[in-house]
């Protein structure tokens, strides 16, 4: 039997294509995670084999590193997180360049497209320590149009999470433009339609070389696509102030029609006859009801907490409906035990916690929650000198305010203990749903939750589940005393 040239190596047991695939998996995920992915892909291999494939690869040729000058970082924002130097991530390889007094950035999320890579990267100001995000091109330099817009969002104090989402959305859009050789200032409506189709395809099939069958699951859901289109509209609205006017491409003006529902905003009659702006392209997305925890599930989470601090955190989320960032930013001065109130105050926090609302609000709480707070201070907090309510008491650094990562690590441990999947934001959904079911006026619920517009409360929580409908019908005697025998 003769060996087919190029199919495999001499005395080899795998084809060259399979060898390259295993090497790529090993480079990306290393041993254990790579072995699990290989099983999903139908490749039978072990983690040691994957690591051996990586070690068999030849060393990359050494190249002269590009000198980083002051001009490369002449933009107002600089990338800063570690003092060792600037780490450049180019095609998966990390290069270290010396920069006196400079900073560094960690390897970011990376998307490969035709013509290079685009990266979404966290940035922190060395002066104010304010966190934001940017998008880097293949030349390691922030993409100019995106950077100008994200800098504007930072200047008007938008949330870093909002800026991060916009950065990812614009990275996808500019990656699509680069792949198709389009200029962002000269796109057509047909190009935007192709962008939507491009988002729906799996990343491996976005080259256009493979036909996508209707049975293939869409990579981006309808709501995700609509969110990206909203980010695109906001980006072009900002660009219109700099002479790039493509606003009419993304919005269409429709005659003012009847507003859904009976609620109307204040002074609605003033602009009732004016045309309404709508997005030109919008996918019809199914409306998802917010996930809430039942009373038994909430009790299971509280009972699974082995420490008073953790129990007080989840009890606070359950009763007050505050966001997790608002809870982590609480100071002792924000809690008034005598008045049984807590104040949510917008401020910069050392742990990066933020309040989504820009206005301070006060929330009434129960005497049981105040007693749990007192037990926590007496039993665990003791004489620790810190302004923050939730701090590291057993981990390091000791006494520092609790971070998002620490909370989600706690959530993962409780998930394993209870066997129940949940998210901290579900407590907020549950608090809002309970208040509405108990007959609390919608404007009071909106005030407690800190919504800037009451329509947000109506759209998010003005839902009627089957259990709600059954309870109302039973109270009305709908299922009793029928005139017709079924």
Image: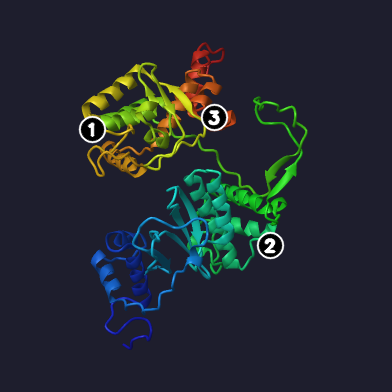
Q: Residue at x 31, y 32 (%)?
A: 301
Q: Looking at the rendering, which quadrant does residue 294 occupy?
A: top left
* Residue identifier under label 2: 186
Mark earlier in primary sequence (1, 3): 1
* Residue identifier under label 3: 457
Image position, residue 339 (x, y; %): 39, 16
Q: Residue at x 35, y 19 (%)?
A: 337
Above or below 407: residue 60: below
Q: Could you tell me how many numbered marks the image carries?
A: 3
The circle on residue 190 is: none
Mark earlier in primary sequence (2, 3): 2
Compared across the picture, whether 292 is left or right of 446 comes to left
Mark earlier in primary sequence (1, 2): 2
Above or below 61: residue 232: above
Q: Is residue 109 visible?
A: yes
- For the residue carrying disc 2, how many other residues have a C-alpha within 10 Å: few (<14), some (14-19), or many (20+)? few
Q: Label 2 near label 1: C-beta < 8 Å?
A: no
Look at the numbered disc 3 and give the secondary structure of its residue: helix
How far apart are the alpha carbons under marks 2 and 3? 39 Å
The circle on residue 306 is: 1
- For the residue carrying disc 3, how many other residues have a C-alpha within 10 Å: few (<14), some (14-19), or many (20+)? some
Image position, residue 118 (x, y; %): 49, 63
Image position, residue 421 (x, y; %): 35, 39
Q: Looking at the rendering, which quadrant does residue 259 occupy?
A: top right
Image position, residue 134 (x, y; %): 50, 56
Q: Is residue 297 visible?
A: no
Q: Residue at x 68, y 49 (%)?
A: 280
Look at the numbered disc 1 and give the secondary structure of its residue: loop
């Amino acid at each position: 039997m003769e060996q087919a040239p190029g199919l495999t190596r001499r005395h080899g047991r795998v084809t060259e294509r399979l060898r390259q695939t295993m090497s790529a998996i090993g480079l990306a995920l290393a041993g254990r995670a790579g072995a699990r992915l290989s099983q999903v892909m139908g490749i039978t291999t072990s983690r040691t084999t994957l690591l051996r494939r990586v070690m068999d690869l030849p060393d990359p040729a050494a190249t002269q590193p590009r000198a980083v000058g002051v001009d490369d970082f002449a933009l107002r924002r600089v990338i800063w997180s570690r003092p060792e130097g600037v780490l450049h991530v180019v095609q998966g390889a990390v290069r270290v360049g010396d920069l006196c007094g400079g900073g560094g950035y960690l390897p970011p999320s990376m998307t490969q497209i035709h013509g290079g890579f685009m990266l979404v990267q966290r940035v922190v100001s060395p002066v104010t320590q304010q966190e934001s995000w940017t998008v880097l091109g293949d030349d390691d330099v922030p993409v100019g149009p995106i950077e100008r817009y994200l800098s504007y969002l930072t200047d008007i104090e938008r949330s870093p999470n909002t800026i991060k989402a916009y950065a990812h959305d614009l990275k996808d859009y500019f990656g699509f433009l680069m792949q198709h050789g389009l200029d962002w200032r000269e796109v057509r409506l047909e190009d935007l339609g192709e962008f939507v189709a491009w988002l729906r395809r799996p990343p491996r099939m976005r080259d256009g070389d493979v036909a996508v069958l209707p049975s293939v699951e869409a990579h981006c859901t309808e709501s995700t696509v609509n969110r990206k289109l909203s980010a695109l509209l906001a980006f072009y609205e900002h660009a219109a102030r700099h002479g790039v006017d493509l606003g009419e491409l993304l919005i269409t003006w429709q005659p003012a029609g009847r507003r859904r529902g009976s609620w109307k905003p204040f002074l609605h009659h003033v602009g009732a006859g004016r045309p309404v702006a709508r997005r030109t392209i919008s996918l019809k997305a199914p409306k998802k009801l917010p996930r809430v925890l039942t009373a038994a599930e909430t009790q299971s989470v509280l009972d699974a907490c082995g420490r008073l601090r953790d129990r007080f955190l989840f009890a606070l989320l359950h009763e007050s409906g505050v966001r997790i960032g608002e809870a982590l930013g609480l100071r002792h001065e924000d809690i008034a035990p005598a008045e049984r109130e807590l104040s949510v105050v917008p401020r910069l926090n050392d742990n990066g916690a933020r309040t989504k609302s820009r206005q301070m609000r006060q929330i009434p709480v129960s005497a049981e929650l105040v007693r749990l707070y007192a037990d926590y201070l007496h039993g665990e907090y003791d004489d620790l000198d810190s302004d923050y309510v939730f701090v590291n008491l057993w981990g390091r650094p000791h006494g520092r305010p609790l971070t998002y990562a620490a909370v989600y690590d706690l959530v993962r441990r409780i998930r394993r203990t209870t066997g129940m999947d949940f998210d901290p934001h579900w407590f907020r959904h549950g608090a809002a749903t309970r208040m509405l079911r108990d007959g609390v006026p919608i404007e009071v619920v909106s005030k407690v939750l800190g919504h800037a517009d009451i329509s947000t409360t109506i759209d998010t929580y003005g839902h009627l589940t089957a259990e709600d409908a059954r309870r109302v019908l039973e109270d009305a005697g709908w299922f009793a005393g029928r005139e017709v025998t079924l």
